[in-house]
Amino acid sequence: MIVLTAVTGLRNRGVEALVETTVEGLRGVAPGEEVAVLTQSPDFDRDHGRRLGVTFAYDGFSMHARFPLLMAGAEAVRSAIGRQSETERSRRLVANAKLAIASGGDCFSSDYGSIASFLVPLRVARKAGVPFVFLAQSIGPFNDATTKKEFVSVARDASLVTVRESRSQAYAIDELGLDQERVALTADPAFLLEPPPAERVAQLRAFYGLSDDEPTVAIALSQGLCSFGGFVGERDGNQLADQHLASLAAVVEEALNRFDAQVLLIPHVQDAWHANDDRLLADRLAEHLGRDPRVKTAWCSHTASEFKGLIASCDLVVAERMHAGIAALSTATPVCVVRYSVKADGIIGDLIGEDAKETGAIIDYEDFLDPKHAVTGLRTAWSNRDAMRSKLLAGKPVAQDLARQNFTLLRDRDLLPASALAAAGEVRT
């Protein structure tokens, strides 16, 4: 069995995109091998991700499992015995695995707080002699020496570290001192996520009342943007939230009135934790705009693939969620990503080039909080959308090839279970 760790849950459609494409990639190089996913929301994930054919198990290593008072409702009253039981089940699952994979994304950074719970299952794997890898990561930067030391103490024993952009590759080798032979530049597996057929996308657009006779601007807004500790710091969260709302409203009004566009709000993360549930911000924004009928919200619990199809049907996407941005990038849809961490520079810079900011593909979070700068960024991206689309079309096959290398590297470096290689007819003598 191969076990995926560092998965927060499929309510975050970016996480879903990573899990789905990782599972598909593993099946390509390890057919028949069972896959288990340690997740913080196993009940939801079993239902929402039923089509993936994997085992979803509660992540007993997660911060929520170890410190349940951080959660509301039923999680807050989980008994001490129950917590120990969950942790023990997770420990056994990892210790008995043939390979442990820390799923991609940017959880190994200082942007969201402590990384400790994401390192625990990898330490369990190391102690049990189970090979482990970091797959398609954006790594760091770490803002304190202790966190940096903790990460390196585990990562230096990884069999493989693949990174999804060149900035992380340089940081892992030059700043963290990881063995360059074990650090490989790839791309985010979500570049391989297939959108649904055109007929399904047309059905979804019709359901939300989107006209094909008018341009569509999508806004993948983030409720969590004003609470991520790595860049909010000591500032007043409520004040930031009000500034954020004002900027979003200005961007929507610009799209409606200058571009004569309809606007689709994309709640890419539909979290059980209200501070990270994009549907709440979408509703607040819609109310702030007087429930303008030209502004639609994709309320339903769509799959990551369905959201990708909706995004690809738009003329421009403003993405506060990185994986909504990747959905645009990987479908050659012009995009303006609100940069709140260095991962945007790496992913978009690698794909579009050093002039990504000048062409409107990136706008800094601090600038976006000023409505005037936010509107200017939107106008810049809108005016450069044809050139952006051409660059993305040229870069898409390269990014997809790099994304596939996450899995071919597992095979080529003999990290897959022997039984899986035998099923693929690739046993080495």
Image (cartoon, rainbow, N blue to C red):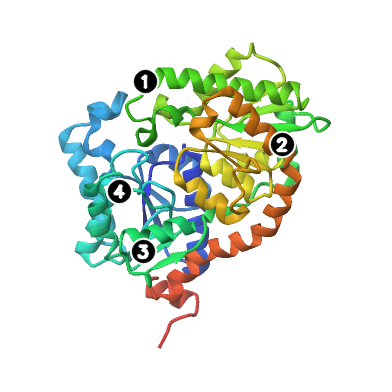
Amino acid at the residue labelled 2: Trp
Q: CA distance from mark 1 to mark 3?
A: 36 Å
Residue corresponding to mark 3: 173
Q: Mark 4 and mark 1 in contact (Cβ < 8 Å)?
A: no
Helix, strand or loop under label 3:
helix
Residue at the location (35% across, 40% down)? 40
- Residue 286 visible at all: yes
**Residue designated by label 1:** 236
**Residue situated furthest left in the rendering:** 81
- Secondary structure category for the residue under label 1: loop
Compared across the picture, whether 25 is left or right of 291 comes to left
Quadrant housing residue 3:
bottom left
Quadrant where the image shows the N terminus: bottom left
Q: Locate residue 33, reporting x and y percent.
A: 43, 65
Residue sitting farthest toward the top: 290
Foreground pick, 12 / 218 = 218
Q: Residue at x 66, y 43 (%)?
A: 359
Q: In the structure shown, which secondary structural element does the residue marked by tag 4 occupy?
A: helix
Mark 4 — residue?
Answer: 118
The numbered disc on residue 254 is: none
Inter-mark Cα distance, 1 to 2: 32 Å
Could you tell me which secondary element the residue under label 2 belongs to? helix
x and y, in percent, of residue 335 in the image: 64, 41
Say which amino acid is labelled 3: Ile
The first of marks 3 and 4 along the sequence is 4
Q: Is residue 306 above or below residue 349?
A: above
The foreground one among 297 and 35 is: 297
Q: Quadrant where the C terminus lies?
A: bottom left
Question: Residue at point 54% right, 24% down?
Answer: 370
Residue 88 higher or lower than 13, as above or below: below
Instruction: Name which residue type carries label 1.
Output: Asp
Residue linked to disc 2: 382
